[in-house]
């Protein structure tokens, strides 16, 4: 999740279309209710219903696990998100190894999320590549075998904002997607409650050009573990609509198109010469098209409520209502507790790692009618939802 996080520290078929409409249970009747009532009614209607309808609304999604407290995309982070009560765990961002295995890393470049720089045996692997049009220097998963990657250990990606997470550097290895699927089953059995995951295909056009297509590998593993069905507890997401369309042909899982800032173009659009931007995709016409092959969208929070020039919240857009009209759910990203990631009016002080008024920000976004939210702080999100539902 989060298409352009390098700047974080400074700032279908007819059947599928019907499924998308069914996601919202009672449809417009539910959506027309005030926020708290809609959340409670959605929860009651979803009990035992299976599939997306079984999830509470607003859904709290553990972004890369509980990445506010542990290095992201590790079993330590995933486990803590579950322990805190996340409805879904984003496990994980999927990138391939040289020998074709899928592993969980935020980006294929792993210099910032592992201790690879401390391994002299891999010093010669450091290189510069063009990744979705951007010159990127570091170490890349596609240049390592799985066995080699397993010798590395995860580290905190944004230590300036999360110095406390440095305590856990080196504790966990890089998980594979297959290990995640096994872990999901183990945790479901252990807890007596279905555990949900929300993996993402990362840079699929880039990897397809390298002969490492992601979608077929994802589909093969989902089929192996019997998790490729309409009601399977695995939601698939991607910033490239073409990747979601490909997955739509391969599996029956619920699918979500991720949307970055309005002026950006999905990379598969760039490669194909499609001039449309995200702004085009969030028009009623663009949303109808998405609803033909996906069940939801994952917009950046700024597409739900715009920001003023000073970084404070402006006015909600019509995106929630427009998406709901065509049967799409919305799971925007990403709520974080630290000051730099909050709208200006919810910041407290100037410390980069200090918490602001995250509860206030959660309430502002929940009030728009979103169906869920990705958050690095599952516990904060759950308390905020309780406030919202009972308020």
Image (spheres, helix red, strand yellow):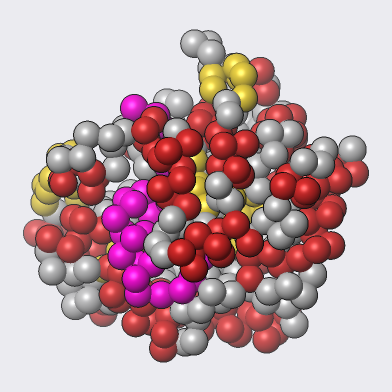
Q: Residue furthest front?
A: 14
Tell me if residue 145 can be seen: no
* Image coords of residue 246 (percent x, y): 31, 65
* Image coords of residue 89 (percent x, y): 58, 62
- Residue at the (58%, 51%) spot, across then down: 327
* Image coords of residue 323 (percent x, y): 56, 42
Q: Is residue 283 magenta?
A: no
- Residue at the (50%, 60%) spot, across then down: 17
- Residue at the (31%, 33%) spot, across then down: 277
Query: Is 7 or 333 nearer to us in this picture?
Result: 333
Q: Residue furthest right?
A: 390
Q: In the image, which residues are magenta?
A: 235-263
Side (left or right) of 201 relative to 116: right
Q: Residue furthest top?
A: 309
Query: Is 76 or 305 nearer to us in this picture?
Result: 305
Which of the 4 image quadrants contains residue 25? bottom right
Side (left or right) of 241 relative to 85: left
Does 297 sit above or below residue 48? above
Q: Is residue 256 magenta?
A: yes
Which of the 4 image quadrants contains residue 315? top right
- Residue at the (41%, 88%) spot, across then down: 224
* Image coords of residue 200 (percent x, y): 41, 60
Q: How many marks?
A: 0
Side (left or right) of 14 relative to 369: left
Tell me if residue 229 can be seen: yes
Does 252 sit above or below residue 202? below
Does 244 sit above or below residue 328? below
| Quarter placement of the C terminus | top right
């Amino acid at each position: 999740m989060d298409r352009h996080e390098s700047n974080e520290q400074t700032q279908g078929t007819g059947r599928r279309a019907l499924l998308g409409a069914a996601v919202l249970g009672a449809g417009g009747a539910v959506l027309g209710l005030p926020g708290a009532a809609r959340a409670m009614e959605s929860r009651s209607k979803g009990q035992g219903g299976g599939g997306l309808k079984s999830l509470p609304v607003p859904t709290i999604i553990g972004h890369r696990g509980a990445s506010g407290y542990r290095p992201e995309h590790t079993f330590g982070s995933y486990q803590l998100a579950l322990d805190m009560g996340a409805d879904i765990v984003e496990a994980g961002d999927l990138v391939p190894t040289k020998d074709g295995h899928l592993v969980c890393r935020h980006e294929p470049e792993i210099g910032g999320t592992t201790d690879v720089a401390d391994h002299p045996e891999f010093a010669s692997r450091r290189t510069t590549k063009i990744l979705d049009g951007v010159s990127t220097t570091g170490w890349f998963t596609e240049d390592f075998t799985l066995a080699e990657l397993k010798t590395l250990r995860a580290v905190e990606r944004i230590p300036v904002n999360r110095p406390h997470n440095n305590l856990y550097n080196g504790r966990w290895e890089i998980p594979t997607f297959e290990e995640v699927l096994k872990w999901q089953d183990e945790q479901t059995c252990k807890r007596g409650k279905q555990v949900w995951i929300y993996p993402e295909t990362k840079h699929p056009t880039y990897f397809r050009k390298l002969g490492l297509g992601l979608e077929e590998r994802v589909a093969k593993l989902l089929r192996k573990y019997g998790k490729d069905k309409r009601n399977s507890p695995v939601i698939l997401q991607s910033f490239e609509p073409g990747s979601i369309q490909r997955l739509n042909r391969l599996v029956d899982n619920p699918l979500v198109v991720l949307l970055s800032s309005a002026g950006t173009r999905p990379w598969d659009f760039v490669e194909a010469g499609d001039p449309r931007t995200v702004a085009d995709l969030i028009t009623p016409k663009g949303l109808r098209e998405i609803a033909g092959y996906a069940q939801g969208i994952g917009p950046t929070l700024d597409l739900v409520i715009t920001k003023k020039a000073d970084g404070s919240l402006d006015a909600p857009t019509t995106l929630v209502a427009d998406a709901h009209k065509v049967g799409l759910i919305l799971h925007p990203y990403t709520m974080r507790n630290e000051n730099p990631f909050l709208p200006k009016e919810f910041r407290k002080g100037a410390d980069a790692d200090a918490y602001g008024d995250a509860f206030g920000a959660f309430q502002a976004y929940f009030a728009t009618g979103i169906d869920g939210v990705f958050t690095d702080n599952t516990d904060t999100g759950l308390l905020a939802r309780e406030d919202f539902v009972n308020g």
